Every structure is written in structure tokens, then in C-alpha cells.
Image (tube, helix red, strand yellow):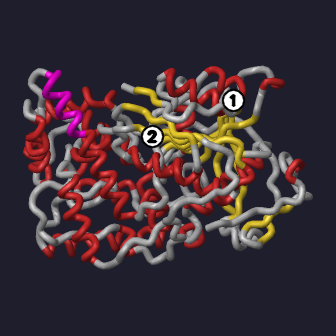
Amino acid sequence: MDVRWTVACLTAIAMVVGGCESTVAGRGVAAVGSVEWGPCRPLPLTAIPPAAQCGKVSVPLDYSDPDGAQATIAVARLPATGARDDRIGSVLMNFGGPGVTGIDALFDWIGYYPDDLRERFDLVAFDPRGIGQSRPAVRCNTDAENDADRAEPGTVITGIGSNIEDTPEEAAAEDRATREFVRRCMARTDPKLLANVGTIAVAKDLDRIREAVGDDKLTYVGFSYGTLLGAQYAELFTDRVRALVLDGAVDPAVDGLQVIVDQAAATQKAFDEYAADCARTVPDCPVGTDPAKAVDTLHALIDPLAERPAPTADPRGLGYNDALTAVWNSMYSTADWAGLTTGLRALRDGQHVDDLLASADLFNGRNAEGRYDNSNDALHVVLCADLEYPQDAAAYVELDKKLREVAPLIRSGPHTGHVARDVCAFWPVPADDTHGAVSAPGLPRVLVISTTGDPATPYLDGVHLAEQLDAALLAVEGTQHTAAFYGVACIDDIVNEYLVDLRLPPDGARCTIG
């Protein structure tokens, strides 16, 4: 995994159409030209800021064949608002996933970036290869197939698991459905993309984007999965890093199944805090007045939806899968707890529960017209491209036992020993096998942010990533997934000072959110 680039003319690499070459894994790759910025095309759910500009960067679809088929990476920027002489460069950003479109997220967060950051940097985001507006695109399911999958209570559409497979027949049926999903991915997506869609390839794309926007070194902010991408970049291109902010860190040393367990435990912790807060502060709390019984109370509400969806104005209704997804989605921030409480109370009282369905739609990338983005398809494809998952059903039986121990929220009821396997158990394309602690000797000291109650990327993952990179660690007290750019001055001031002046916080720095 320790690939090094040698560059003959580093100082002239930006804005050059030819004349420089770099080497990736021993193969020449011509330097890219600058981005031709222009208007952005309309987005289905996101307003385009007036100053926004969009463009494209061409990259090899397969970096071992640089002269072969090319992929097009969609990029967007918010130009620096300050004087040209004060501009430092670009901050490249990845907002997580895998599967999230960076362009939409860049624009959605426009009100939260610190003024000084906006003045000194162009803010640049991109849709990773295969995702969003980038081409070729990953595609597995049609809109109708996504709706149908979500309606089946045993389907693991969000990757959070289910407790429905109680018999050998049900587990076998779910395995057949998963195999069919994999078959659709293979049939509908460019096979060369499927073989080159993992984080290593995206890190190489990130370096091409850095070059195309005219920066000699990378200044980068990555959230959640974006921290894994940033760590991979640091290992591949150590000498090209100016500054990295890795917020909501993923620990590269943790294998795929353990990631599921750790994330489930963190989500359970967040739900327990929600239940205690609801019991303490909310009259007529829908998960009850005893937090110790909140999981049972919740499942008494949502388990019947496996047989009969709750009413919504939308003819789909709210099924079991979507109800569990709405709960899971609401754990990402305490700001979402009030909406969850209102939705669960409506569910309990037999009222329409469109808000819960809307939350599940948002998580699954479905818009009001019933069209899906490809975020869920890409989530599975990238995970399977990155890590080898076991094929043996016994590994998933053991996983199920662990999930029931640490997260009864998402795996309730007794362990039956009949469990469906993960999508990646059936994936026919060999994985890059990126599992393992990251190593980047000579890396400038970078910043890792980890939140104590993060429901998706546990706090200790950030501690471990900071140790692997010898990075500064900002610990954040709170229950929220990621912490920067939410308007908390303690956090944003530290991030801004680092990105602008390369000044890191002192050891032991802490902030509080929420």
C-alpha cells in the first residue's frame, strides 16, 4: 500500500497541460490541465449558490492503464471571497459515505464555513468516481427495485442489519435476494469501474484534482469516510500534504465486520442517551419513562410494521426497514431528536408518519419524485472494493451474536443462528484489501477530530488514527457525527487556524458540542 510518486518538475505541475510526468506504481501518468470552471447544472435537492462554479477532471479509469479508458470526476468550488493576494489556495473536501456526492454537500453547508476560511481559500468538493455526476456511474438498482427492497423487512438496504431472519428458509431467501442485487450491479455498471472504484483509486483521483486546481500541496478536510480517504492519500502521497483535517475518523486497522460491531455499539450508546433525555425532558415520551426499557418499547412500535406498514400520505406507508432507518438516522445529531420523538409519538397514536418516511428517504437518497441517487449502490460497491469480507455463513452467525449483545436497537430478539450474509460475501471482484494501520513517515503534523458520543465513527477510532499518523487530536464532548462547521466557535476556530496558519491546538485540546 506504500506507493510513492516521483515528479520531475513539482514546481511547474499546476496549470500545465503537458511537459511533466509522475509515476504511479511504476507507470507514467501525464500531468492534468487546469479545470475549466463554468455554471453548475441544477441539482434535485440542493440550491446552487450564486458564486458556485463547476467543472470536470479526467482521470484514468484504471491507473495501471493510464492511456486506456478515462473516468470523468465532477468537481465544484466556492471561490475565495477575499482579495486575490490573500488567497492561499484550495481546500479540497470529502463529506463521507462512501457514496455521498460531495458537490451537493459543499453547497448544503455554505452557511457554516468560517468567514476567514472562505476569504483565504477556494472550497472545492467532488463526486468520487462512480458517484453522483461523475462518469461512468455505479448503478445496481432501479428506483422501483430500491422501493421494493426497502419494503422487505429482512433487506439490509442501509447496512445496519435486521432481526427478521429467524428461520433457515428466511435466511436463504435473503441470501438469494443479495445474490440478485450483486448480479444487477455486475450487469449495470462498467466492469472496469467495479474493479477500480475503491479508496486507493479515489485517493489517486484526489491528487489529480489537487493538481488540476493548481495547488502544489493538498489542503484537505475529510469527514467520516473522508478520513479514510485522507489517511490513504497521506500514505500514498506523503510529500504532497500541506494540511489534513480528519473529522469523525475511521480506523483503517479495524476489519470490515468489526467496523459493523463498533458502529452498532456507538449507535446504541446514542440511542440510550436519546431515551434518557426523552424520559427526562419530554412529557409523554414515546419510548417510555424508563430508559432501560426504551429498546423494548421502540420495537413494540416498529416490529408490527414488518407485516403492516404505518399510514403515510405517500402510498408506500412506513415499513419496518424504514422505521429502523429513521431511528438510526436521527442518532447522528441531538438536533434530530425532537423530530424523532414527534414521529414516534405519531406512530404510537396511529397517525400519519410522513416525517419518519422522509427521514428514511433522505438516508436512502430518494427525492420527492421517487428518484434515487446512487449513494446506496455506491456504498456497497466501494465497501466491497476496499475490504475482503468472509464468505462463510458462520462468520455472520457470530456477527449476529455480537450485534445482539452490543446493539439490541438494531438486532432485537433472541439469536436463532439463521442469518443472511453481507453483500460483500457474494462480491465477485477482488478487493484492494486496504485493511491495516496507515503509515506515513515524514507526514507534516495533521489534525484529527473525534467526538466522544459519535454514533457512526466511535471516539477511539479517532484516537487510534491520530496515533498512526502522529497527528494532533481534538477531542469533542457531545453526541453527534462529526463536529466541524456546525457553528461551534471552539471547534471551528481551531480548524480555521490550522488550515490558514498551520497552527495546531495544544495537546489535550477539548471542545464541547450540543
**Residue at label 1?**
500
Give the residue drawn at x 76%, y 62%.
Answer: 5
User: Magenta residues, as a range?
Assistant: 271-282
Dot 1 amino acid type: Val
Whole-percent x and y of residue 25? 72, 71
Dividing the picture into quadrants, the one containing residue 116 is top right
For the stretch drawn in magenta, what is the main secondary structure?
helix
Q: Is residue 170 visible?
A: yes
SS state under label 1: helix
Q: Is residue 139 visible?
A: no
Task: Tell me the quarter of the image containing the N terminus.
Answer: bottom right
Q: Nearer the viewer, residue 262 or 17?
A: 262
Q: Is residue 272 magenta?
A: yes
Q: Amino acid at mark 2?
A: Ser
C-alpha span from label 2 to label 1: 21 Å
Tell me the residue that label 2 is attached to: 450
Residue 394 is drawn in which quadrant? bottom left
Q: Is residue 435 above or below residue 32?
A: below
Q: Is residue 264 above or below residue 246?
A: below
Considering the image in quadrants, where does the C terminus appear?
Answer: top left
Toward the viewer: 439 or 162?
439
Look at 74% across and 39% down and name the residue there. 37
Q: Who comes first in sequence, dot 2 or dot 1?
A: 2
